[in-house]
Amino acid sequence: MTEQLTLGRFEEACEIVGKVTLDTKLIYSDHFSEMTGGRVWLKPENMQRTGAYKVRGAYYKISTLTPEERQKGLITASAGNHAQGVAYAAREYGAKAVIVMPTTTPLIKVNRTKALGAEVVLHGDVYDEACAHALQLAEEHGYTFIHPFDDPIVAAGQGTIAMEIIKDLPLVDVILVPVGGGGLATGVSTLAKLLRPGVKVIGVEPEGAACLRASLEKGEVTTLPTVSTIADGTAVKTPGRQIFPYLRQNLDEVITVPDVELVVSFLDMVENHKMVVENSGLLTVAALRHLDLRGKKVVSILSGGNMDVITMSSVVQQGLILRDRIFTISVLLPDKPGELHRVSGIIAEAHGNVIRLEHNQFVTINRSAAVELRITLEAFGTDHKKSIIRALADRGYEPRQVQISI
C-alpha cells in the first residue's frame, strides 16, 4: 500500500477544505442515547454546502490539480452528492464540469447539479454503469476524471470529517460511517486511527449493496452481480481498489442494514431531530439498533440530506405503516342503517382517527347478511392499534387487517 494518507496530507486537506465547508458541529441526541444506553452524537453533513459531505473530497482533489488539468474540463460519475461537490468546486475554480449520473438519480440531485453550472449526462441504471461511460467520455474529450471514491486524495478530503469529530469530542469511542464505494470510510477511519488509535470505526452498508463486506470476506476487491437498495447514494457494486487496503487496515467492522430499517430511521430523524436525511445518510442511524453501545460515546455520520419530495413522501408513508401508525382493517356488517355510525363510535371511543372508508356492497350476493367496510386508521403505534382492533372484536365484529392502500 502506497502511504499517501499521512497526517500531513490530512492537515493540508483540512486547511484547504475549511475554506468552503460549513462547520457542522456535533448534535447530541437524547432520543438515540436513551435507545442505545450510550451517549450518541450526530455529525450533520446533511447540513453541509451542497447538502452532503462530498464537497470536501471534490474540492480538495481539484485543488491539487494543475491549471492545465483543470482547463481541460472535469468529469465524474455520481449518484448525486459527489456530482454536486464537483460542480461546486469546478465553479469555484472556473473549470467546466461534466457529470454522468445514473438514470435513476432523484430529480432534486440532477437539478441541483445543473444549477451549479455543470453539464449533466444521464446514463445507466447504477453508478458503475455511469462511471464506465464517464471514463469513456474522458478519453474521447480529454477531460480530467475525478473519481468519487477510489482516490486517496479524494478520501483525504472526506477524512477531514474525522478531524472535526475528534476536535469536538476528543474521547469518542465509536464512529459509525456509511459505506458506498468506501471513500468516506477510508478517510474517516484512517485519520481517526492516526489521531486516536483506540477509537473504533464501523462501516455501515445497505444490505442490498454490501460490496465492501463481500470484498473483506473474500480478501480481495469483489464486484456484486447486482445491487438493490433505496439508499441510492451507496448503491455501488465494487468498492475502490486503490483505497481497499486502507479499508481493510483501519475499519474495525462492517455491518449491513436492510432498507426497511432506513424507512423507520427517517421517521426517527424527522420526529426527534426535525432533520431530513437521505437514505444513505441514515445507514449509521439504523446501525445503532444492531450494536451494543452501552456506556460508549458514539458519533453517527449523517452523510447527506438530498432527498426529493416524492421519495420523501413514500418513505414517510411506509414508515408510518411499519410503525403501525397507519393501518387498514376490514369488517363485515349487515347492510342496514346505523351500522356505520356504530362502528365509527367504537373507533372514536378507542381514540382512533379514521383516514378513509371504503364501503363494498358487493362482497357477497346476500347484502342483508354482510357488506364489507374497509377502514384506514391512524394510531399512536402498535399497542394503540391492537386496542382499537380489540374494541371492535369485543363489540361483536371480526376485524381483519388487510394490506394498506393509500
Image: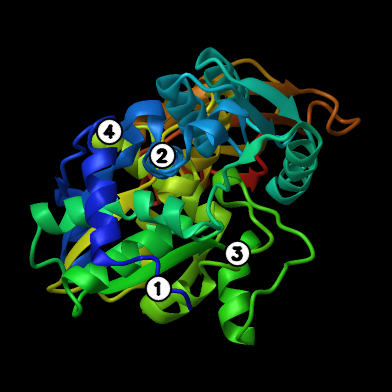
Q: CA distance from mark 4 to mark 3?
A: 26 Å
| Residue plotted at (64% across, 85% down) | 218
Q: Earlier in the sequence, mark 4 or mark 2?
A: 4
Q: Where is residue 363? Give x, y as percent.
A: 83, 32
Most foreground residue, 211 or 96: 96
Residue identifier under label 2: 304
Three-letter amino acid code of the residue under disc 1:
Glu
Q: Where is residue 373? Give x, y as percent.
A: 67, 29
Most foreground residue, 241 or 234: 241
Q: Earlier in the sequence, mark 1 or mark 4?
A: 1
Q: Is residue 133 left or right of residue 144?
A: right
Q: Where is residue 196? Give x, y as percent.
A: 16, 73
Q: In the image, which disc is placed on residue 230?
A: none
Q: Tell me the element at label 4.
A: loop
How busy is the neighbourhood of tag 1: few (under 14 within 10 Å), some, or many (20 plus)?
few
How busy is the neighbourhood of tag 3: few (under 14 within 10 Å), some, or many (20 plus)?
many
Residue 77, compared with residue 96, is above or below; it is below
Q: Tell me the element at label 3.
A: loop
Most foreground residue, 24 or 152: 152
Q: Is residue 323 among the parts visible in the rendering?
A: no
Three-letter amino acid code of the residue under disc 2:
Gly
Q: Which quarter of the rendered picture does the C terminus lie within?
A: top right
Residue 75, compared with residue 119, is above or below; it is below
Q: In the image, which disc is placed on residue 3?
A: 1
| Residue plotted at (51% across, 67% down) | 243
Q: CA distance from mark 1 to mark 3?
A: 19 Å
Residue identifier under label 4: 21
Q: Where on the picture, by quarter, is residue 333? A: top right
Q: In the image, which disc is placed on residue 239?
A: 3
Three-letter amino acid code of the residue under disc 3:
Pro
